[in-house]
Image (tube, rainbow, N blue to C red):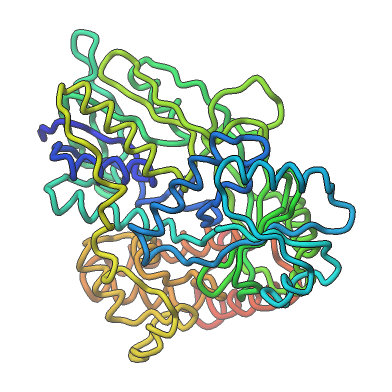
Amino acid sequence: MLKTDVIIIGGGSTGCGIARDLALRGISHCLIEKGDFAAGATGACHGLLHSGGRYVVNDPEAAAECIAENMILRKIGRKCVEETGGLFVRLPGDSKNFRDRFLKSCETIGIDTEVLSPSKALDLVPTLNPSIEEAIRVPDCSIDPFRLCLLNIVTAEKKGARIFTHHEVTEIIKEHGRCVGVKAREEHTGDMKEIRGKLIINATGAWGDRTAILADCTVPMTLSKGSLIITNHRLTNMVINRLRPPSDGDIIVPNEAVCLAGTTSVPVLDPGAVEVDPREVDIVATEAEMMIPGFGTTRLIRTYAGVRPLLKSETNDDRKISRGFRIIDHENGLYSIIGGKLTTYRLMAEKMCDTVISVFGLKTRCKTADTPLEGQERLSGYPLSKRLKKLKDIVCECELVTRADVEAALSSVGSRHIGDIQHRTRLGMGPCQGGFCTYRALGIMQEAGRMTPDDSMRTLKEFLQRRFKGIKPALWGDQLREEQLVESIYLGILAMEREE
């Protein structure tokens, strides 16, 4: 049995941020995550470090939090933030009244803006729709959510925190009415761990209500699915937003060698059972094409969906629910933190840790806004030119991941999960979506003794099924032809059996 002061359940950006904050304040803790880091909404977002412009008209409090955290994360996380800048583009027919409210609200909140003529906007992003009426420049950025989580965990581990990924909490232990610990099951072996703590934090995002139920508590939540699509190359070097009230398909975000476009907003009940509806792909692609006309003829390589853990609201329109956050004291040793956004994860962690410090009767102040994230040089993959310098034993041609990169990741995490390697190296995240590199990485894992031949074959089949699930809604044109090629390679050349 392990004893610690604080138990964090959930390894998304909020959970990882809490771990780092507690470490810097000298509070012992452990973090338990049922998958790998960023397995939920964090890893399924569009990788946007918000300027706040998206919310400035309808949700000014969330917008103010976003711009403040945007500036902090640029400073402390330079290696996982790409300072792209962003444009809000007004197309013919878009409301000029909304444009005026947007500019006035930005000025009130303190978001820097610059109104650009169509010609100046096209100089910045030549692929833009040439019929735009105008564009407004804002300080949006692109951010890597996987790298962000890993960098937060570096400090926690260096300060002695115990981190358990691929462990699912099956029970919150209660004694005399108080939560005093958890039991967690290891995903691969089924081994159980019992961990005791003075305080438990539920940071499980969309699974917040299900986790709270383990302690006979409730969390008021509204779950909203957002679906996104990925293009096979980068269509813009700036974040492109539609200058109108939030709606489907109004943002395009450059991310490494590709672009992400989204999103939708669909109420759901089960965060573990979401799929992308092909109609959502049509909507997002059509809307994106209005901002960047070339979008319609660009190959879509994958779709994915995440679930927003929103605060409970009476409104039927998910887009009108605040993107703010809330800490709930269940008054039995369990705290839940819900709502918020990737951009505000650090602030959420700060407020949660302030609560912990208050409960413990301490006065240690938060240091996360002034202390750069540790490990940035080691985990930095930007830009691709950096990887081009080490063109040797390439395993993943799309993302230029080498055998040494895979072996280093295996050595650092001791993993038996191909997803852990992907999150740490970007293997399989490029145009082929792992079709031509995953089996090579599994071979390396087998050679390293991480899995048996049977394990690697089972893992490969599971991976191909998950991959096809994400690609299926976007199968047409060139992407359909590539998928047929991948299928023929695996079924015809590598003699894999078709799943019934």
User: Residue 266: percent from the left, percent from the top?
Assistant: 67, 38
Which residue does the image show at 47% across and 62% down from the upper left? Answer: 463
* Residue 28, horizontal then vertical, whole percent: 13, 37
- Judge left or right: residue 302 versus residue 24: right
Q: What residue is rendered at 58% in x and 31% in y?
A: 322
**On screen, 35 above or below 82?**
above
Q: Locate the N terminus by quadrant.
A: top left
> Residue visible at 28% across and 57% down?
373
Does residue 231 show up? yes
Q: State whether residue 472 appears in this view.
A: no
Residue 321 is left or right of residue 151, and the answer is right
Count of labels shown? 0
Q: Residue at x 21, y 62 (%)?
A: 414
Q: Residue furthest top?
A: 176
Q: Which of 61 and 316 is in front in this view?
A: 61
Q: Residue 493 versus residue 418: which sits nearer the camera?
A: 418
Asked if residue 311 lies left or right of residue 320, the reply is: left
State the image quarter where residue 137 is shown.
Answer: bottom right
Seen in the image, is 437 located left or right of residue 222?
A: left
Quarter occupied by the C terminus: bottom right
**The quarter of the displayed image where residue 121 is located:** bottom right
Residue nearest the viewer, comparing 291 with 215: 291
Residue 471 point in image, percent of width and height? 62, 63
**At which x and y percent is residue 79?**
36, 67
